[in-house]
Image (cartoon, rainbow, N blue to C red):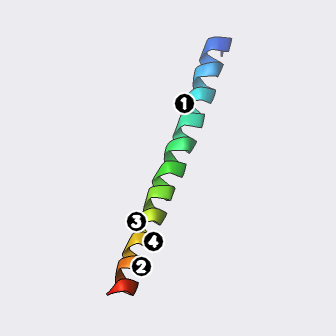
Amino acid sequence: MDAAGQAKAIYDATRKVDEEKLTARSEQARTAAAEAKTAMS
């Protein structure tokens, strides 16, 4: 694999991890919001 291909592979892998982190964070936020709503009612 040449340097450009390697750089792209690393970039793609990093972006995938970032997307998974964002997804996990938004799911946590959704859960927290649902719990807060339940606690308030």
The answer to whether 17 is drawn above or below residue 34 in the figure is above
| Residue position for label 4 | 32
Label 2 with label 4: CB-CB less than 8 Å: yes
Asked if residue 26 lies left or right of residue 1, the reply is left
Measure the alpha-carbon separation of dots 4 and 3: 5 Å
| Residue position for label 1 | 12
Measure the alpha-carbon separation of dots 3 and 1: 27 Å
Label 4 with label 3: CB-CB less than 8 Å: yes
Closer to the N terminus: mark 4 or mark 1? Answer: 1
Residue 9 placement (x, y as % from top left):
59, 26
| Residue position for label 2 | 35
Closer to the N terminus: mark 2 or mark 3? Answer: 3
- Quadrant the N terminus occupies: top right
| Residue position for label 3 | 30
Measure the alpha-carbon separation of dots 2 and 4: 5 Å
Closer to the N terminus: mark 1 or mark 2? Answer: 1
Q: Amino acid at mark 1?
A: Asp
Residue 32 placement (x, y as % from top left):
45, 71
Measure the alpha-carbon separation of dots 4 and 1: 30 Å
Asked if residue 7 lies left or right of residue 39, the reply is right
Q: Secondary structure at mark 2?
A: helix
> Is disc 4 surrounded by few (<14), some (14 to 19) or many (20+) residues within 10 Å?
few
